[in-house]
Amino acid sequence: MATGYVETSALIRALFEGDAALEASLGKMKRVITSSLTFLEAHRTLWWAEHEGRLDRRLLRSARQKLREVEGSWAIRPIDDGVLLRGRGVFPVEPIRALDALHVATALLWHEKVEEVVVFSCDQRVRDNAEALGMEVRPR
């Protein structure tokens, strides 16, 4: 079993958009890790959805509960100096946005120093860079 790194777009798709296949694929991972950035982005996404009236109170409450459950069960990697230094560097597929670079850098450092990771992302810039750096990417 592999370790999965989940980028925000995959988290949103699995939890809030009902992608059961993606959620099942995540469930098969030995361990799931992510960046502290992922939960910041996910919480902001819910605030925007509320602000724009895209979700009613019941759905928002349910979404926030799901997010808290996931947040309590995944290993959360901080945005430390190593991640920031790697995020500032050149990536194989440029341009890449700053927050996407932080996601790729977090996954890459874990991949290089601890164990192989499978990157879960629906963001093409993240996917392209993760693949170019030798990581498997899902969903296919």
Image (spheres, grey):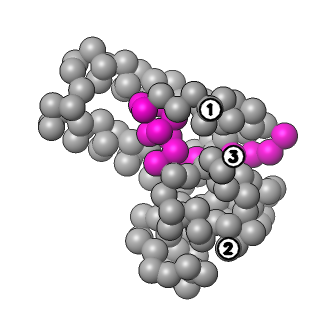
Residue picked out by circle 3? 4
Query: Helix or strand or loop: what does disc 2 sit on?
Result: helix
Characterize the local packing of mark 2: few (<14), some (14-19) or many (20 or more) Cα atoms within 10 angstroms: few
Give 49 or 67, whichever is nearer the viewer. Answer: 49
Apparent side of residue 124 relative to residue 133 in the rendered image (left or right): left
Residue 3 in magenta stretch: yes
- Please give the name of the residue rendered at 46% of the width and 74% of the height, measured from the top-left corner: 96
- Circles 1 and 3, Cβ within 8 Å, touching? The answer is no
Query: Which image quadrant: the N terminus?
Result: top right
Characterize the local packing of mark 3: few (<14), some (14-19) or many (20 or more) Cα atoms within 10 angstroms: many
Residue 109 in magenta stretch: no
Q: Does any portion of residue 79 appear in the rendered image?
A: no
In three-dimensional space, the C-alpha distance between marks 3 and 2, rounded to whole angstroms, equals 17 Å
In three-dimensional space, the C-alpha distance between marks 1 and 3, rounded to whole angstroms, equals 15 Å
Residue positioned most to the front: 140
Pointer 1 or 2: first along the chain: 1
- Please give the name of the residue rendered at 21% of the width and 21% of the height, measured from the top-left corner: 56
- Closer to viewer: mark 1 or mark 3: 1
Characterize the local packing of mark 1: few (<14), some (14-19) or many (20 or more) Cα atoms within 10 angstroms: few
Apparent side of residue 35 relative to residue 46 in the rendered image (left or right): right
x%, y% of residue 28?
Answer: 75, 33
Apparent side of residue 51 relative to residue 101 in the rendered image (left or right): left
**Magenta stretch?**
1-17
Residue picked out by circle 2? 132
**Which label number is shown at residue 21?**
1
Amino acid bearing label 3: Gly
x%, y% of residue 6?
Answer: 58, 47
Residue positioned most to the top: 58
x%, y% of residue 115?
Answer: 81, 56
- Please give the name of the residue rendered at 55% of the width and 85% of the height, measured from the top-left corner: 90
